[in-house]
Image: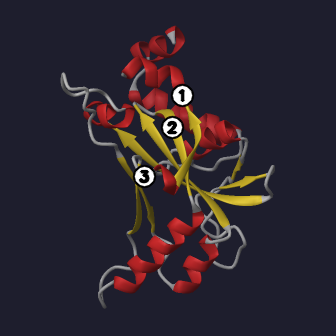
């Protein structure tokens, strides 16, 4: 951690962002700083996946709507991510809020599926595994794997309820971390969770 602190204290935002860009370029990720593309190789490394070099695959590809390949299961993986602020940490780790031992409400995480704008597109997502990474100060502390049937049912319901003329983007899947039957934990930084309780 001392090396990271040293970098943060001695280099500008521009230098750090430029270094991130060059690291991504050196590993084959074109423009890894675009949106949150850089989070995909981070999540892939923690999950044992191979992140795709480009931001998104074309509609005609079996990679459509996927960000990585899982060689252990021979399946594509779609990644979403959420950055939590310090206030949300209490919800994420289940911090006790009063002397009765009550905890703060579980955190809700979500993924926006801009590609889920037709039933045919949604069907393509049914062939992928889905993951939501939770980042605190850009450190990945948790990755959940929502059940694919829950993702598809939610996307389909949202699509069917879309008002005519409304945007086809922003089809969102929300997972309440208290609803443990809707997902499994794929990665957890247990040391971080313990330090934040």
Residue 20, placed above or below residue 193: below
Q: Is residue 62 above or below residue 175?
A: below
According to the picture, the residue beneath numbered tag 3 turns out to be 179
State the residue in front, 94 or 191.
94
Instruction: Examine the rendered structure and indicate whether residue 7 appears above or below residue 154.
Output: above
Give the labeled residue for mark 2: 142
Q: Quadrant of residue 91?
A: top left
Cα separation, mark 3 vs mark 2, equals: 16 Å
Disc 1 + disc 2, Cβ < 8 Å: yes
Image height check: is 167 above or below 69?
Answer: below
In the rendered image, residue 105, in percent from the top left (x then y), is placed at: 28, 42
Q: Which residue is mark 1?
A: 189
Q: Which mark is residue 85?
A: none
Choose between 56 and 62: the one closer to the eye.
62
Locate the C terminus by quadrant: top left
Q: Which residue is at a point 45% across and 71% down the rendered structure image? A: 154
Task: State how many labels appear.
Answer: 3
| Front position among marks 3 and 2 | 3
Asked whether residue 38 is in view, the answer is no
Separation (CA) of disc 1 from disc 3? 20 Å
Mark closer to the observer (1, 3): 3
User: Which is nearer the N-term, disc 1 or disc 3?
Assistant: 3
Of the numbered discs 1 and 2, the one sitting upstream in the chain is 2
Q: Is residue 127 visible?
A: yes
| Mark 3, secondary structure of its residue | loop
CB within 8 Å, label 3 to label 2:
no
């Amino acid at each position: 951690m001392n090396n990271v602190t040293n970098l943060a204290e001695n280099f500008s935002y521009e230098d750090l962002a430029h270094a991130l860009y060059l690291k991504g370029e050196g590993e084959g990720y074109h423009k890894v700083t675009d949106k949150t593309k850089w989070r995909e190789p981070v999540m892939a490394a923690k999950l044992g996946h191979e992140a795709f070099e480009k931001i998104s695959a074309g509609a005609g590809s079996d990679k459509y709507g996927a960000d990585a390949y899982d060689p252990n299961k021979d399946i594509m993986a779609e990644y979403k991510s959420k950055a939590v602020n310090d206030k949300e940490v209490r919800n994420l780790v289940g911090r006790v809020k009063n002397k009765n031992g009550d905890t703060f409400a579980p955190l809700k995480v979500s993924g926006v599926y801009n590609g889920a704008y037709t039933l045919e597109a949604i069907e393509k997502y049914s062939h992928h595994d889905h993951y939501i990474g939770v980042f605190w100060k850009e450190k990945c502390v948790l990755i959940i794997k929502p059940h694919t049937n829950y993702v598809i049912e939610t996307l389909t319901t949202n699509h069917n309820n879309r008002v005519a003329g409304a945007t086809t983007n922003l089809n969102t899947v929300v997972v309440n971390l208290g609803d443990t039957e809707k997902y499994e934990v794929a990665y957890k930084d247990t040391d971080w969770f313990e330090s934040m309780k």
